[in-house]
């Protein structure tokens, strides 16, 4: 239990570079290290994601100038403006935490769920019931049973067996005997002792194993050492490189004016190398383009003004509004972050260089630039670009039957008119089936409304 708790604590702790530590945190870890012996120090370094050289540098810096000296390099690198942006981002994150810890919805699991299927996977009764409910909903909307099962990583035979068993827990209990090659408690302790020793505390397992082999010592494979370190909560990102970015928060919209996405794209002009910039905000639930403006430059002040004029009414409605974007400079500008905080709008950001995290805006830009009416040659000037974009927005919102929202226009869905439209289509198909029943072997086409839209759902 202690090992599991340590591993869970390490997994939930933020992954930071040494230069991201505050002066107080540096002093605390230096003081803590002074109380430890060699073996304990190696464990501390691995749990905190530090190298011995980094700790030595901080200790020497403390001896030279204390806290002010530790803060000096960090202050010089960031500057007053950067510190202000960081403060605003932390405030936005704090206000967007929700009811659960770490930004999760209260009661949600702490880790992302694994794929629902997979050969040999065991499912408890609650998981089986949830899976069968999802498949039933999918087949009711017109999906085939085989395809619905494939999407969840299951076979239709597995679902059939569950139905025959009437639900309940998986009856398999795993092997009754301990694997013959399992490490003993002494061997597991020896792996941790070696990995946290002064000689190897700074090395990764794929460096430790060759060193030991050179001296005629074998304690286990790289994967064994990794597994033991992970169980002990000692697998942390170390070094100056940024830790891999975590997935952005999964967001769900159940109606209009709850979740917006925005981005900027370049539009070419007749002058080679010169562009004008299209700022576009869309409502993810309805796919309606809420705002679209073309400007000569790309900057946070323009974005902040557009957001204020566009989102103020939605923010005043009392419903929580999220605004998602990528990590571009205008999106992270202090001006825009201050405006979002003023309006009470929660910010969400994509991972660096991961366009799929802002898929709705990227898809809209693709639709825009592949329209038959999109000019084959660059725009003559700013006014020409603005005129064409205005025509596109009208077509997209008022005329375009969007395939992802049951082929209604974004404006109809945003205003709630799509329910009557889809009901009329359903009646038309019901009448046609009654008149020509031989044309349908199974259900008619589904004209049900799409109730929710997800942004970056959990895998």
Image (spheres, rainbow, N blue to C red):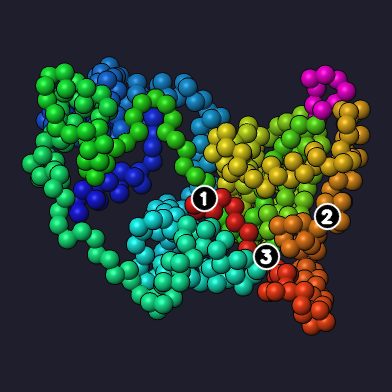
Q: Quadrant of residue 23?
A: top left
The circle on residue 330 is none
Q: Is residue 92 above or below residue 447?
A: above
Callout in the foreground (3, 1): 3
Give the CA separation, mark 3 to mark 1. 22 Å
Locate residue 452 relative to residue 373 in the image: left or right.
left
**Residue 327 position within the rendered picture, expressed as x and y whole percent measured from the top left:** 59, 36
Query: Would residue 412 be seen by someone viewing this image from the given angle?
Result: yes
Q: Is residue 253 above or below residue 333?
A: below
Q: Are marks 1 and 2 in contact (CB under 8 Å)?
A: no
Find the residue positioned furthest to the bottom. 434
Element type at mark 2:
loop
Dominant secondary structure (helix, strand or loop) of the stretch shown in magenta:
loop
Residue 270 is one of the magenta-drawn residues: yes
Residue at 26% over, 36% down:
223
Query: Which residue position holds label 1?
Result: 249
**Residue 183 position within the rendered picture, expressed as x and y whole percent measured from the top left:** 13, 43
* Classed neighbour count for the residue bearing mark 2: other residues with Cα under 10 Å, few (<14), some (14–19), many (≥20): some
Query: Which residue position holds label 2?
Result: 400
Residue at 74% over, 57% down:
403
Q: Which residues are magenta?
A: 268-276
Give the CA separation, mark 3 to mark 2. 17 Å
**Residue 91 position within the rendered picture, expressed as x and y whole percent measured from the top left:** 51, 46
Q: Is residue 453 above or below residue 131?
A: above
Looking at this view, is 274 or 129 the one in front?
Answer: 129
Query: Which residue position holds label 3?
Result: 450
Q: Are marks 3 and 1 in contact (CB under 8 Å)?
A: no
């Amino acid at each position: 239990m202690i090992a599991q708790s340590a591993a869970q604590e390490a997994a939930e702790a933020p992954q930071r570079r040494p230069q991201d530590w505050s002066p107080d945190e540096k002093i605390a870890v230096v003081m803590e290290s002074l109380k430890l012996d060699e073996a304990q120090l190696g464990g501390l370094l691995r749990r905190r994601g530090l190298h011995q050289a980094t700790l030595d540098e901080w200790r020497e810096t403390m001896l030279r100038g204390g806290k002010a000296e530790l803060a000096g390099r960090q202050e010089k690198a960031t500057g007053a403006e950067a510190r202000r942006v960081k403060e605003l981002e932390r405030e936005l994150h704090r206000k967007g935490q929700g009811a659960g810890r770490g930004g999760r919805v209260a009661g949600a699991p702490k880790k992302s769920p694994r794929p629902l299927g997979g050969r040999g996977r065991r499912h408890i009764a609650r998981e089986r019931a949830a899976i069968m409910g999802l498949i039933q909903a999918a087949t009711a909307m017109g999906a085939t049973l085989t395809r619905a099962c494939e999407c969840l990583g299951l076979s239709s035979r597995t679902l059939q067996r569950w139905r025959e068993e009437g639900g309940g827990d998986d009856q398999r209990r795993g092997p009754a005997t301990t694997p013959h090659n399992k490490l003993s408690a002494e061997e597991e302790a020896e792996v941790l002792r070696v990995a946290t020793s002064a000689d190897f505390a700074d090395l990764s397992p794929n460096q430790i194993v060759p060193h030991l082999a050179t001296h005629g010592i074998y304690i286990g494979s790289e994967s064994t050492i990794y597994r033991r370190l992970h169980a002990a909560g000692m697998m942390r990102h170390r070094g100056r490189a940024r830790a891999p970015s975590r997935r952005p928060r999964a967001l769900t919209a159940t109606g209009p004016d709850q979740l917006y996405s925005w981005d900027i794209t370049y539009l070419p002009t007749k002058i080679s190398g010169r562009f004008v910039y299209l700022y576009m905000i869309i409502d993810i639930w309805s796919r309606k383009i809420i705002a679209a403006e073309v400007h000569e430059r790309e900057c946070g002040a323009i974005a902040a003004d557009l957001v204020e004029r566009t989102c103020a009414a939605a923010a005043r409605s009392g419903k929580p509004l999220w605004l998602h974007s990528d990590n571009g400079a205008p999106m992270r500008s202090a001006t825009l972050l201050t405006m979002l905080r003023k309006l009470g709008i929660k910010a969400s950001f994509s991972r660096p260089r991961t366009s799929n995290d802002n898929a709705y805006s990227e898809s809209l830009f693709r639709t825009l630039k592949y329209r038959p009416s999109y000019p084959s040659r660059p725009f003559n000037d700013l006014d020409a670009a603005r005129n064409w974009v205005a025509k596109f927005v009208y077509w997209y919102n008022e005329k375009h039957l969007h395939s992802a929202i049951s082929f209604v226009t974004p404006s109809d869905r945003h205003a709630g008119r799509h329910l009557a439209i889809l009901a009329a289509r359903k009646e038309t198909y019901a009448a046609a089936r009654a008149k020509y029943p031989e044309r349908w072997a199974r259900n008619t086409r589904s004209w049900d409304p799409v109730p929710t839209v997800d942004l970056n759902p959990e895998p």
